[in-house]
Image (cartoon, rainbow, N blue to C red):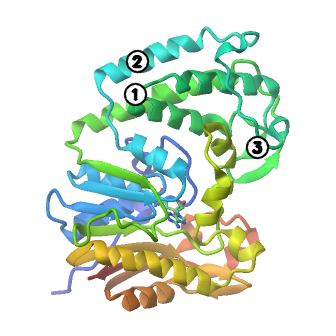
Amino acid sequence: MDEKRYYIDLDAITTREKQALTHNIHPYPAKYIPQIPGSLIDYLGIHAHSIIMDPFCGSGTTLLEAAIRGHDAIGTDSNPIATLISRTKCTILSKDQCAHIDKFLSRLDRFDATDDSFIVIPDFLNRDHWFQENMQKELGYIRGLIDSVADSYTADFLRTAFSAIIVKSSNQESDTRWRAKNKNLPDGFALMEFKKKVLDMLCRMRQLEQYNIGTVTVHTQDSRYVDFIQDGSVACSITSPPYMNSFDYYLYHKLRMYWLGYNHYEVQKKEIGSRNKHCDNGCGIDAYVDSIFQVVEQVYRKLMAHGFFCVVIGDSIYKDELIHMDQVYNEIAHCAGFTTKEIFSFDQRKYTRAFTPNLQTVDKKSHIMIFQK
Ligand SMILES: C[S@@+](CC[C@H](N)C(=O)[O-])C[C@H]1O[C@@H](n2cnc3c(N)ncnc32)[C@H](O)[C@@H]1O
């Protein structure tokens, strides 16, 4: 009989399934579909009530998939927008907290553009270039109201909804295009989008109540330094590391960070693999490998004996050369002490849209790699 191997039929997964529960409450670049970490947890037969870790948790896909299976999950990410979304995605608010949100929404109707008392508009570079005046006032009003919410879970929920509507309410062309265009957004647009977002999130959050979800802890942290996680405590780590030279997560969330009061320069410094570091500032592949190795070493330490480490990574282009990331990660994992159990590769072009169309012709693959301690 053939040995059982990991397999996932990506074509068979519907959009509705990909966006189920709270998975789609906020846009996030390069997030993986929940079925990938979910199927890995099932395939590996992780014991009930284990700890599952994601050192690059992004919007919390692994964390939620672990939690709905009754596991506890620990996520770290250097980007505070990522950890905000992750926390909200995995939290079920109480009836009292939901009642507070209902009251909050009713206060939106009292918005008065001529009354500045509740309006908090942060000062940032090119604010008038990126935001119409009416949108600044509406966003400032929402921000001011959120600032007065004392309960941190309720405030996080509202901040996540707020963050999710920032780009729509700005002049930024789209989430993936860092270019301004005149959208002529009518009065009331940001308030209405926010309300719609909150109601949708509440509805999705209620769907989590059917699960006995595990405890999820999320840290805003450079994952090269995670001493606060106990060595040998984690059963399995499933992650999709930042691709080399593909994204700038700090840039993607820059307008959000301005409005939420985060320092994007600090985030930029810690970000591994960014286009800014590799393309504009000439960091080579060695710098990427060194940083990833530090994180993989940490994961090795945190895993219990025979614990699993799963990496989902795509090939990269660097200086016109195709970098086979399965080879790179194999070497990193072996150096850290892991053995390779399985590698499942698929054509990346079929599942992701390249931002640079000519790269669409390059034979790039994505890899789901399973290592064991
Ligand atoms: C491919 S994304 C992860 C997406 C995630 N799997 C999801 O479904 O949302 C990679 C993440 O690595 C994070 N990252 C980059 N450098 C980091 C560092 N030094 N420490 C922790 N996280 C980092 C980025 O902020 C980004 O969220």
Query: What residue is disc 2 on?
Result: 100
Q: Position of residue 159 (x, y in %)?
A: 52, 34
Asked if residue 313 lies left or right of residue 318, the reply is left
Q: CA distance from mark 3 to mark 2?
A: 32 Å
The furthest residue to the front: 227
Q: Is label 2 in a helix, a strand or a loop?
A: helix
Indicate the quadrant containing the N terminus: top left, top right, bottom left or bottom right.
bottom left
Q: Residue at x 43, y 69 (%)?
A: 225
**Where is residue 27 shown, x and y percent of the image?**
56, 47
Q: Which residue is mark 3?
A: 172
Q: Where is 241 relative to 264, above or below? A: below
Q: Residue type at mark 1?
A: Asp
Nearer the observer, disc 3 or disc 2? 2
What residue do we see at 66% from left, 80% from top?
317
For residue 233, which quarter of the picture?
bottom left
Residue appearing at x 72%, y 15% in the figure: 116
300 displayed left or right of 167? left
The residue to which callout 1 is attached is: 151
Residue 263 spot, x, y in % from top left: 64, 49
